[in-house]
Image (cartoon, rainbow, N blue to C red):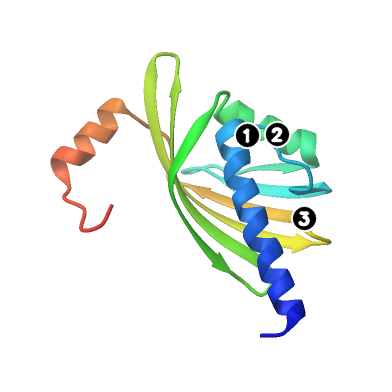
């Protein structure tokens, strides 16, 4: 692996870690997104888009206004950036919530320039319990 390839991969891994921080805090760490970053967000049976950091943060906060935690994630490098699979948990209005997301990021000039997010939808406590009673997962 060349030095350039290692640098690109290191930058992508650092950005993936920063992206998890953004998911958990709602605040993008410095350098995470390019100023004109584009996000294409696909929740179940819908599609939303955002252009620019402020618009992207507003889109995030519209769906997840508070802090969350990402107990599990998987990172895979791609030729143009990375793919990140996450499980996310948060509390909102006295309810516990859970979702799974797949995020594909393109990196330009050391920051995320394009982000596609595919979300399972938000599961409340009752849905999580129903799933646990109905399905035995082979892996967490």
Query: Helix, strand, or loop for circle 3?
Result: strand
Circle 3: is it few (<14), some (14-19), or many (20+) Cα within 10 Å? many
Query: Helix, strand, or loop for circle 1?
Result: helix
* Extreme residue toward the bottom, this view: 1
The answer to whether the residue labelled 1 contacts the one labelled 2, judged by CB atoms less than 8 Å apart, is yes
Q: Which residue is mark 1?
A: 60
Q: Nearer the viewer, residue 44 or 127?
A: 127
Q: Residue at x 69, y 75 (%)?
A: 6
Circle 1: is it few (<14), some (14-19), or many (20+) Cα within 10 Å? some
Q: Position of residue 49 (x, y in %)?
A: 69, 43
Q: Which residue is mark 2?
A: 57
How far apart are the alpha carbons under marks 2 and 3? 15 Å
How far apart are the alpha carbons under marks 1 and 2? 5 Å
Q: Position of residue 40 (x, y in %)?
A: 65, 49
Query: Helix, strand, or loop for circle 2?
Result: helix
Question: Quadrant of residue 7 in the image?
Answer: bottom right
Number of marks drawn: 3
* Extreme residue toward the top, this view: 94
**In this rendering, position of residue 131 left or right of residue 105:** left
Q: Residue at x 72, y 70 (%)?
A: 8
Task: Please tell me whether mark 2 or mark 3 is closer to you in this view.
Answer: 3
Residue 89 drawn above or below residue 51: above
**In this rendering, position of residue 68 left or right of residue 15:** left
Q: Nearer the viewer, residue 59 or 107?
A: 107
Q: Which residue is mark 3?
A: 111
How far apart are the alpha carbons under marks 1 and 3? 18 Å
**The label number, if any, that marks residue 69 in the structure image:** none
């Amino acid at each position: 692996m060349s030095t350039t390839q290692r640098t690109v991969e290191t930058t992508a891994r650092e950005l993936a870690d920063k992206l998890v921080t953004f998911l958990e805090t709602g605040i993008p760490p410095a350098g995470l997104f390019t100023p004109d970053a584009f996000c294409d967000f696909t929740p179940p049976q819908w599609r939303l888009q955002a252009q620019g950091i402020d618009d992207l943060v507003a889109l995030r906060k519209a769906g997840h206004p508070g802090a969350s935690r990402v107990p599990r994630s998987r990172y895979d490098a791609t030729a143009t950036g990375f793919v990140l699979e996450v499980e996310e948990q948060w509390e909102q209005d006295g309810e516990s919530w859970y979702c799974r997301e797949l995020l594909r990021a393109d990196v330009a000039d050391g920051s995320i320039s394009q982000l596609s997010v595919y979300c399972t939808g938000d599961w409340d406590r009752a849905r999580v319990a129903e799933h646990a009673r109905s399905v035995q997962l082979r892996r967490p």
